[in-house]
Amino acid sequence: MRALDYEIPDELYYSKEHEWVSLKDTNATVGITDYAQKQLHEIVYVDIQKKGSGVKQFQTMGSVESVKSVSDIFSPVTGKIGKVNAELADSPELLNQDPYGKGWLVEITCADSERDMKNLLTAEQYSEYIKKLEE
């Protein structure tokens, strides 16, 4: 799916803070959306909570710094960080180059994935949300 000029994969879920979630059982892989990385422009630094940290849905779990600004990253689910993408420490530009692939941020073991998913947007809903932001 495409909204304006942004890639929005249909199989993912999205937050209004522009994070995406891929859910497999209770494991959620999380990253920032194509819209977010284009708004930030050139990303130069990523700061994410460490493996084992507890996170709550829609609460800050880190930040990304670009040549333009610093933006918070919000967890789209509640749970515990099981894995952090270590490649981002040396190559934060992966968020710009491949936001839905090599630019993933963390894997989170969800406390209640069913509840959390109800608070997220489908690709179609996220597309409509972006269109409203762009108006």
Image: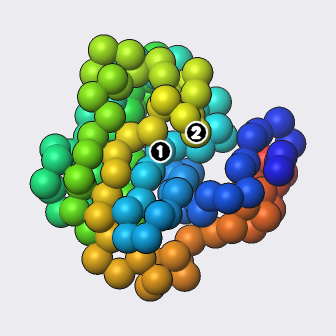
Classify 78 as above or below 28.
below
| Residue found at x 45% / y 39% | 104
> Which residue is more in the foreground, 134 or 36?
36
Q: Which mark is residue 31?
A: 1
| Residue found at x 33% / y 23% | 87
SS at mark 1?
A: strand
Left or right? Give the position of 15 relative to 85: right
Task: List the single residue furthest toward the front.
Answer: 25
Determine which residue is flagged by label 2: 100
**Colour scheme shown:** rainbow
Q: CA distance from mark 2 to mark 1?
A: 7 Å
Are circles 2 and 1 on residues that touch, CB within 8 Å?
A: yes
Left or right? Give the position of 74 relative to 82: right
Q: Position of residue 21 (x, y in %)?
A: 51, 57
Q: How many marks?
A: 2
Left or right? Give the position of 42 relative to 78: right
Give, as a three-letter code, the residue at label 2.
Answer: Tyr
Classify 104 as above or below 42.
below
Q: Which mark is residue 118?
A: none
Q: Quadrant of residue 131?
A: bottom right
| Residue found at x 47% / y 45% | 31
Q: Position of residue 80 (x, y in %)?
A: 22, 62
Classify 47 as above or below 41.
below
In primary-sequence order, the first of circles 2 and 1 is: 1
Classify 10 Å Cα crowding around label 2: few (below 14), some (14-19), many (20 and above).
many
SS at mark 2?
A: loop
